[in-house]
Image (tube, rainbow, N blue to C red):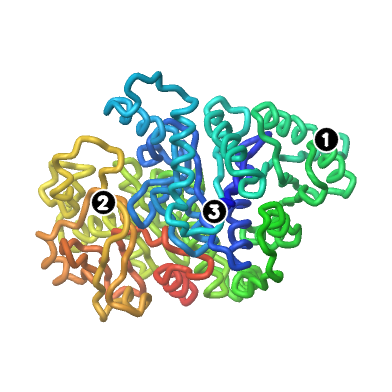
Amino acid sequence: MADVKYIFVTGGVTSSLGKGIISASLAKLLQARGYSVSIQKLDPYINVDPGTLNPYEHGECYVTLDGAETDLDLGHYERFLNIPTSQANNITTGRVYQSVINKERKGDYLGKTVQVIPHITDEIKRRIKLVSSGNKFDIVITEIGGTVGDIESLPYIESVRQMKWELGSQNCIVIHLTLVPYLSASGELKTKPTQHSVKVLLENGIQPDILVLRTERNLTGDIKRKVALFCNVEEEAVVESVDVSTIYEVPLKMLDEKLDQTVLRKLALPIAERPPLTEWREFLKKLKNPKHTVCIGLVGKYVELPDAYKSIAESFIHSGAENECEVIVDYIHSEDLTEHNYVERLNGLNGILVAPGFGSRGIDGKILTVKYARENNIPFFGICLGMQCAVIEFARNVLNMPDAHSTEINHKTKNPVIDLMEEQKSIIDKGGTMRLGGYKCILDKNSKSYAAYGKTEIVERHRHRFEFNDKYLDIFKKNGMVPVGINPESNLVEIMEIPDHKWFVGVQFHPEYSSTVINPHPLFVQFVKACITV
């Protein structure tokens, strides 16, 4: 018997069906039944990681505590399980091929022809097992990106086939997520796409053990029996996943559908009593029954694609529930804000968050947004570039430095209040070369940040190259913008606040990456609280 049990989640018919949410929901249920669970994502694209991808291409780039730039689904895993992921939890085709080619160049395969089978598939299997090395977990769930039938996914599907054969059916199962569309013209739910999707899996040598059917309408018993019959799975292993109002309902839906019980039975693992999920249910109760409502403007340059700010949006859901408050996020494109319209566009908001980002596009709109929040005493939260914009705005309009800027945007500025980190100045490569992952920060006890965290030392995740320029520290302090969070090793400024303002906090790190359902991030909680009392 294998020490670790493996569950693979594949998708068919169409992308974006929610494999990540199903994987995270199942993991949550298994965790609630007493099993230690980890989830990983296999991404078929040839990029080594999503760090150099435009958010329009692939949504948000999520950063782990150990400094890996990963797929946004890892954020869902952490938010559901409340445990950190790592470099090992995200595998890309680029990383797999890079590793195999490096080995070939070193002579590890000397005399051999390097091929997809066995060399690429062996590397995929090695990395799948890497997350469970040392037997840290009872169960590892692996989500395979893309859709079954895609050319780029074939090596991953073949690796799954091999693992099922090597480990046996009680140690390795496959859950296939498909779509059962509703045709309004005929008033019918159609199972044919699911049948064809399973046929593609079978052509690749894999018989799915469980089918999860995404649908906008409830499935009848007849439909489930039909799918079971034509797809060669048990009727109990056909699971309905109907559309819900929030992704956080999915674990409870899967509990009602007994997905976790079916999985444990197929893996020959004991089935403990039904988990109460008390904290989860309490969170949902608060989420669905708010006592307050606030509208917070999220100002960024990728607002056409909400997934670009996925972790921030989810952090507002967590912190909103904690405050028994519905947070309505008003996505505002920073490029649309000008000297002529910014006051009218931002008027009426209960709070403003200026989002992270890179490059010059939309920067002027972000600086105008900061000015509006500062001058009108509107609760303000700046994250990464948002904090840097707050520094630039303060330098220009309070410190009388009209040309103040970041050298990222204007390398000729005479007042580089934001400048490139010294160790970054000689770096040419873009991928994985920023200040990434968890770094310590020491908080000033007389700060709003300390009031939020309730402790002096914190660790937060970073993803940036540029920093507050220490040469300007004294003049900022004297004029009312104060550094209240400092990295103890480098003395870099991590948090800037305006003490005289209702709530004005800019952070160089990314607090949104650390917010979970059970532990909403304290800065988001306090920011929303400040917005309620406007």
> In the rendered image of this protein, does residue 512 appear above or below residue 114?
below
**Mark 1 or mark 2: which is in front?**
1
Kind of element beneath mark 2: strand
> In the rendered image of this protein, does residue 231 appear above or below residue 310?
above
Residue type beneath disc 1: Phe
Q: Badge 1 is on which residue? A: 230
**Among numbered discs 1 and 2, the one appearing first in the sequence:** 1
Horizontal side of residue 248 vs 517, given as left or right: right
Camera-side residue: 126 or 426?
A: 126
Q: Seen from this angle, which residue lies furthest right?
A: 222
Taking the spot 14% from the left edge, 45% from the top edge, the residue there is: 413
Residue type beneath disc 3: Val
Coordinates of residue 445 in the picture (x, y in percent): 26, 80
Camera-side residue: 342 or 121?
A: 121
**Among numbered discs 1 and 3, the one appearing first in the sequence:** 3
Q: Badge 3 is on which residue? A: 4
Mark 3 is surrounded, within 10 Å at the Cα level, by few (under 14), some (14 to 19) or many (20 or more) other residues, namely some
**Among numbered discs 2 and 3, the one appearing first in the sequence:** 3
Taking the spot 18% from the left edge, 61% from the top edge, the residue there is: 492
Coordinates of residue 203 in the picture (x, y in percent): 68, 26
Coordinates of residue 42 in the picture (x, y in percent): 50, 40
